[in-house]
Image (spheres, rainbow, N blue to C red):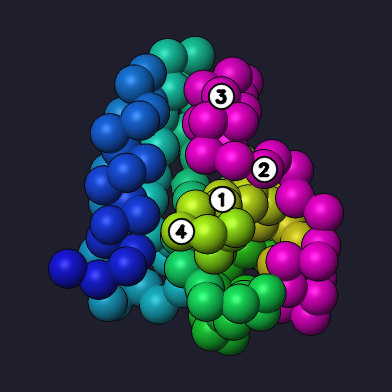
Amino acid sequence: MGPETKFYQKLRKNSKGIIWTRLENLSSLGTPDLLGYNTSGTFFTVELKVTKGKGVRFSPHQIAFHKSHPTKTFIMVQAPGPGSLKLVHMFQGSRITELEACGLTLEACCLGLDASIDYLKNLN
C-alpha cells in the first residue's frame, strides 16, 4: 500500500461527517484524488500529497485543474514532523503555483489533520 493510500485511509477514518469518493481517473489527468461532501451539502475536492521534505511537486495537469477550478479545491500535504510524527498542511487549490514554488514554507490555511477536517466539515 502506497503512502497516499495510507494517508487517505487515515483521513477517511478520522473525518466522520464527510462522505469521500476516491477518484481513480486516468482519462482526465489532473483530477484531484478525492471528492468530498459534507453535511452542509457542499462538494469539494482534495489532492493528497505525501512528501519527505519541504518541496511539493505537481504535474502540469494538476496545476491546470486547480487554476481552472479555484474555489472549493484543496491540497493536503503530509510531511515528516518531529520524531515519527507526520504533519498535515492544507492549502487552497488556487495557491498551487505558490505551493510548488515555496513548498511547505508557504502559510497553510490549516495545519494539522483535525483542523483540516474541521475546516472541510464547515465549508458552505
Asked if residue 76 shows in the view, the reply is no
Rendering quarter of residue 67:
bottom right
Residue occupied by mark 4: 84
At 32% from the left and 51% from the top, the residue drawn is: 8
Badge 3 is on which residue?
118
Q: Residues within 10 Å of mark 3 (few under 14, many from 20)?
A: some
The residue identified by callout 1 is 88
In the rendered structure, find residue 111 and report the number of the disc placed on it: 2
Mark 3 or mark 2, which is nearer to you?
A: 2
Mark 3 or 2, nearer chain start: 2
First along the sequence among labels 3 and 4: 4
Amino acid on which disc 3 is placed: Asp
Marked residue nearer the N-terminal end (4 or 2): 4
The tag earlier along the polypeptide, 2 or 1, is 1
Judging from the image, what secondary structure is the residue with disc 1 in?
Answer: strand
Q: CA distance from mark 4 to mark 2?
A: 17 Å
Q: Residue at x 17, y 68 (%)?
A: 1
**Badge 4 amino acid:** Ser
Question: Marks 1 and 2: in contact by CB < 8 Å?
Answer: yes
Q: Estimate the x, y position of residue 122 in percent, counting from the top left.
A: 59, 19
Q: Give the CA distance from mark 3 to mark 4.
A: 24 Å
- Percent coordinates x, y for residue 119 in the rendering: 61, 28
Mark 4 vs mark 1, CA separation in Å:
13 Å
Tell me how far mark 3 sits from mark 2, CA to CA: 11 Å
Residue 32 lies, in percent from the top left, at 44, 61
As drawn, is 115 to the left or to the right of 99? left
Query: Quick one: label 2, few (<14), some, or many (20+) residues within 10 Å?
Result: some
